[in-house]
Amino acid sequence: MPPGKALDGNRECKSLRVRAGRMTRVTETSIPDGARRVAATLAELGHPHDVVMLPVTGRTAADAAAALGVQLGQIAKSIVFRRRSDDAAVLVVTSGDLRVDEKKVSALVDAVVRADADFVKAATGFSIGGVSPVGHTTPPVILVDRELFRFEQVWAAAGHPYAVFPLSPDELVQLTGAPVEEIA
């Protein structure tokens, strides 16, 4: 699938312009499965914005911010940890310009360690660089960092390294049901 497309379920195709490049809404079946799953979840939850396929990779927060022409902090990056006591996935969503404090996460949910790529894929259904806050194959424990509330709009991964979607921090909390904590 060529990057630079947006997936919005079964809605009408229209143009969407982002400063970093031209993007259009599509309903093609060539959309990656993860992005399609996130788009379907967002539609089910009544989220008003579409999944956007970037013209370049958004695998890192810096890549996504550059592609979208937004501040690094506006990227809602997803970091996955493995809880030691039960191997549960713990997903922390924080600002792209900050580092997650593993000790703070452990204090909130019990001891955690950084998850490797195989664990992330098995636990969430997404590869590192495309982990969305919604649409997981197995629901993780989710924490939202309060630092995201510095921004009116943030962009989260949408199931694929080229896929993102816009939302407000309040919408993020509503979509995930996650508590807002001091994590960075």
Image (cartoon, grey):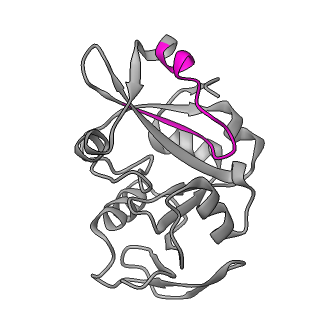
| Count of numbered marks | 0
Residue 146 location, quadrant: top right
For the C terminus, give its image quadrant.
top right
Q: Residue at position x 33%, y 38% from top?
A: 116
Nearer the observer, 105 or 59 = 59
Is residue 20 among the parts visible in the rendering?
yes
For the N terminus, give its image quadrant.
bottom left
**On screen, 129 above or below 81?**
below
Is residue 17 among the parts visible in the rendering?
no
Residue 59 locus on image (x, y percent): 49, 59
Magenta residues?
90-106
Nearer the observer, 62 or 173 = 62
- In reply to whether residue 104 is colored magenta, the answer given is yes
**On screen, 132 above or below 140?**
below
Residue 26 locus on image (x, y percent): 42, 84
Q: Residue at position x 41%, y 50% from top?
A: 131
Q: Residue at position x 52%, y 22% from top?
A: 102
Residue 66 locus on image (x, y percent): 68, 67
Residue 21 location, quadrant: bottom right
**On screen, 50 above or below 153?**
below
* Left or right: 117 in relation to 110: left
Nearer the observer, 159 or 55 = 55
Residue 23 locus on image (x, y percent): 56, 83
Q: Residue at position x 28%, y 13% from top?
A: 85
